[in-house]
Amino acid sequence: MNYQMLKTLIDSLVTNFKCPNCNGTVSESNIEIVWAAWSSINLDVECTQCSKHTFVKAEVSQMNLWNILDMTNGNIDELKQKLQNKLSGISMKKISMPEKAPQIKEKEILELREILKNDNINVEDFLGTN
C-alpha cells in the first residue's frame, strides 16, 4: 500500500469513524497500524472519548479512472451511472463465526499487546520454541 492510499484511508477514518460504544470520534494520534501488507491493513482505533479500542481491517482497491473517463468521453454523469450500476450488482456477504468456536476477547488482545511491548518478552516466551 503506498503512502497516498494510506493517508487517504486514515483521513477517511478520522472523518467518518464513530465509536460503536459511545458514538465518539477519533483522531490520527488514536490510530495505530497493527499490520499492513500489499493492499490490506489492520488498525487499532482508540476512541478519544471513552478509550474503547476498535479493530478495523481495510482493503484498498485501485481503479484506473482515466480508462473509464475515456470510455464515457469525459461525461461525468455517464461515469456516475456506470459506477452505480456496477456497485449495485455487488452483494455484501456477512461473515459469521460458528457458534461453538472459541473467540479471543478484545481485552485479551489488548493485554497481550501491552505485555509484548516490554523489551524482555516476546511471543516465544508464551508459545515456547521448537
Image (cartoon, rainbow, N blue to C red):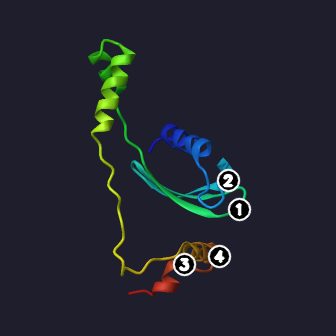
The span from disc 4 to disc 1 (Cα, nearest Å) is 25 Å
Q: Earlier in the sequence, mark 1 or mark 3?
A: 1
Looking at the image, residue 117 sits to the left or right of residue 128; the answer is: right
The span from disc 4 to disc 3 (Cα, nearest Å) is 8 Å
Q: Earlier in the sequence, mark 4 or mark 2?
A: 2
Hey, which residue is sitting farthest right in the picture?
Answer: 49
In depth, the one of 105 and 93 nearer the eye is 93
Q: On the image, numbered disc 2 is attached to which residue? A: 24
Note whether residue 119 is visible. Answer: no
Q: Residue 16, located in which quarter of the rendered image?
A: top right
Label placed on residue 122: 3
The reply to whether discs 2 and 3 touch (Cβ–Cβ < 8 Å) is no
The reply to whether discs 2 and 1 touch (Cβ–Cβ < 8 Å) is yes
In depth, the one of 47 and 4 nearer the eye is 47
Q: Amino acid at mark 2?
A: Gly
Q: Residue sitting at 31 percent across and 12 percent down?
A: 73
Label placed on residue 50: 1
The span from disc 2 to disc 1 (Cα, nearest Å) is 7 Å
Q: Amino acid at mark 1?
A: Cys
Label placed on residue 118: 4
Note whether residue 39 is visible. Answer: yes
Q: Amino acid at mark 4?
A: Asn
Q: Neighbour class for label 2 at 10 Å: few (<14), some, many (≥20)? A: some
